[in-house]
Image (tube, rainbow, N blue to C red):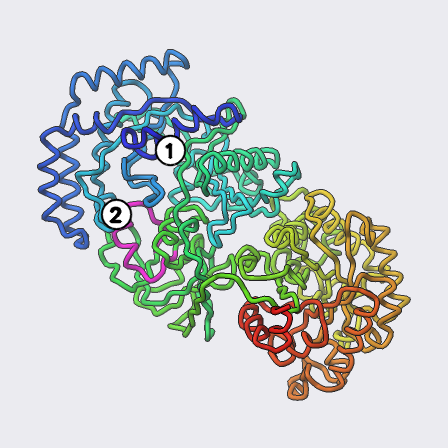
Amino acid sequence: MADLEQVGGKNASLGEMISGLAAAGIRVPGGFATTAEAFREFMGELAPRIDERLRKLDPKDVDALAKCGAEVRSWIMARPFPADLERDIRSKYQELTSHTSPETSFAVRSSATAEDLAEASFAGQQETFLNIRGADNVLEAIRHVFASLYNDRAISYRAHHKFDHAAVALSAAVQQMVRSDLAASGVMFTLDTESGFRDVVFITSAYGLGELLVQGAVNPDEFYVHKPMLEKGRPAIVRRGLGSKLQKMVFAKSDKAGKSTRTVEVAEADRHAFSLKDPEILELARTAVSIEHHYGRPMDIEWAKDGADGRLYVLQARPETVKSRTRDVEERYALKGSSRVLTSGRAIGHKIGSGTVRAVPDASQMARVKKGDVLVTDMTDPNWEPVMKLAAAIVTNRGGRTCHAAIIARELGIPAVVGCGDATRRLKDGQAVTVSCAEGDTGNVFEGLLPFEVSTRERGEMPRIPVKIAMNVGNPQLAFEFAQLPNAGVGLARLEFIINNEIGVHPRACLEYSELPAPLREKLDAKTRGYADARSFYRDKLVEGVATIAAAFWPKPVIVRLSDFKSNEYKKLLGGERYEPDEENPMLGLRGASRYLSPDWLGCFELECAALRTVRDELGLTNVELMVPFVRTVGEAREVVDLLKKNGLERGKNGLRIVMMCELPSNAILAEEFLELFDGFSIGSNDLTQLTLGLDRDSGLVAGSFDERDAAVKAMLAMAIRACRKHGKYVGICGQGPSDHPDLALWLMEQGIDSLSLNPDTVVSTWMALAEAPAAKKSAAA
């Protein structure tokens, strides 16, 4: 890195890794770099001429920018190399190929002295040339790379960031290519790119050379690896996402320019399989962590697998410059209205933007984009950058979370929804839309200009209060973001959300796959792509959902409630109509503990237990605790605890705590007897209120009488809290009440409850309100 001024950030980093990380087993393909001095010698008297031309340019005038850039590049392309520089490049190339083979391919890339620095890192400012063979073609590619310092997007970027054009020089990298055209390649980050969460490595992967992935032309596979468990030697992959991977870039026979790649369709079977095996994912994650430790900061790393030798290589590494620069300010966006969803895709960031659709088929028409428009196109590449900064939001047909549009949207701090598939067809030019990335991984484009609010607060120390504040978390996709709120862990993680949103299939349909009618099997096949079979799909998706939440909050406790769907809710899942009964009042029917003990449900419950056992015992996320919902009788409680033990989830084993959801009057009345079987109570105030007051909370006719603060409900709450305190058992509440009613939260704190598990959006406000109470001030003073 000491040579940064000579060879720019990219080449300095390559040299740093080759010299400093080879001993750690990190493989970086070799090559050579031309220096900034060589570039300046090549430019000679052309440099002041270019500087004069750029001084007259208004970079906001897209047409003038294109004309100026083309003119400057033509001057450079017509310029011969100085004789000594050409001789040295030929000599170095000869030396490289003497160690490999004359048929070895090289990539010729740029490394600008103001590129890939901690304060400035943009995707693909200059050109890259792949599969280059022969000294003549290498020289021609280097000239093209030099000229690309004056691409329209590069000129615009330097003007936007107030870099002096004349102060920027270029180093060319000539690096041996990895045969990823025969395997896969991708990008990885040593943090989560959306939330900035530091305890994961985020890996993207697609078949072939990496250019299509970076451009956003393919939707890649995605993997999250939990660093703390990786360090312990655990199989720490907590989440997987199967990308469509429709195309790949491969080597081709050289054309006249020596640029020899082509794009081909990916075979159907390969599209439906993950492009990396688990051992490869873990090796990449270990590599990423080693690089992060070496540099001492979050990193953005390109990697490739060589299909010839089967090994993984690092192609470049640079500092991650968006989330690692984020100030300690929490910013939250929330929609305040709703309308028809026009299209959906992968959400980039957590913001909301609105404006007029500007549907642009290609970069030649990008001048139509005006400030505040919503840019809609098939995909973007670096040529789009001069107008992307004008957009209120960006929507694309193609791309994943590391595509060009995603990277630039993060850099600019605007919302983007990528990989929609049909955005250019569904969104009409001139249409008013709202682009929301505030609901998790899925970004939605809504019809019309919807109202939304933005709230901010400085992150910092929270005041001491005599109660722990935990969170209710259902959506694993938001766990990394929620974990950065002040919290004492998760008081309620709902399996129902994972089953409904991540799986969408009735568990019996997965277990009885061979007995399903052909049309239902076809639908199930489409959902389970990438997994060994339907049973594995159900179990593994449960594992991934729970593990993501547990990893986000590690090592704080995460209480996972066993599934508590009612029959009418299970019926809505794929295949559910085959298995679920018709019940007059499902709220009081086959749910919770009764369902687990039903002979028809035994296989499904075993599948659920296997997933939770995997999270704790194999992945090592022992902060996961279990909660048993809707237990009607002490006898039923005893049977469920025994059933859990038979399935390898024994209370006390490997530190496992099992709590019971206290949500029926019988639970409070016989609290001491139930507590003999459990490690404590988590009070479900929704059902406790319903059953104490005898009203159906799903009925709008009696909804006005529903109030967790009713004296009868409070009597039940007090009874449960007293019993837990008497026996030294845990007691918390995970129902809606304290999130909705700060006065109830205060009353519960005064009763001596251990924890309040709140909806994430009420954590800070409730915490601050409780801190003002006399009991909290007295506790803080003590």
Quadrant of the image for the C terminus? Answer: bottom right
The number of discs equals 2
| Residue with the mark numbered 2 | 157
- Give the residue drawn at x 51%, y 51%: 197
Query: In the image shown, does 122 or 209 lie closer to the viewer?
Result: 122
- In this rendering, the answer to whether 22 lies above or below 530 is above
Amino acid type at circle 1 is Arg
Residue 4 disc label: none
Amino acid type at circle 2 is Tyr
Q: CA distance from mark 1 to mark 2?
A: 29 Å
Q: Is residue 369 left or right of residue 337?
A: left
Q: Position of residue 446 (x, y in %)?
A: 43, 68
- In this rendering, the answer to whether 99 lies above or below 387 is above
- In this rendering, the answer to whether 738 lies above or below 619 is below
- In this rendering, the answer to whether 587 lies above or below 28 is below
Q: Position of residue 731 (x, y in %)?
A: 75, 67
Quadrant of the image for the N terminus? Answer: top left
How dense is the environment of label 1, judged by Cα within 10 Å: few (below 14), some, or many (20 and up)? few
Query: In the image shown, does 137 or 687 lie closer to the viewer?
Result: 687
Q: Quadrant of residue 255?
A: top left
Q: Is residue 526 left or right of residue 432?
A: right
Q: Which range of residues does the magenta coloring cover?
A: 377-395
Query: In the image shown, does 490 or 533 lie closer to the viewer?
Result: 490
Q: Quadrant of residue 531?
A: top right
SS at circle 2: helix
- Give the residue drawn at x 38%, y 17%: 103
Residue 262 disc label: 1
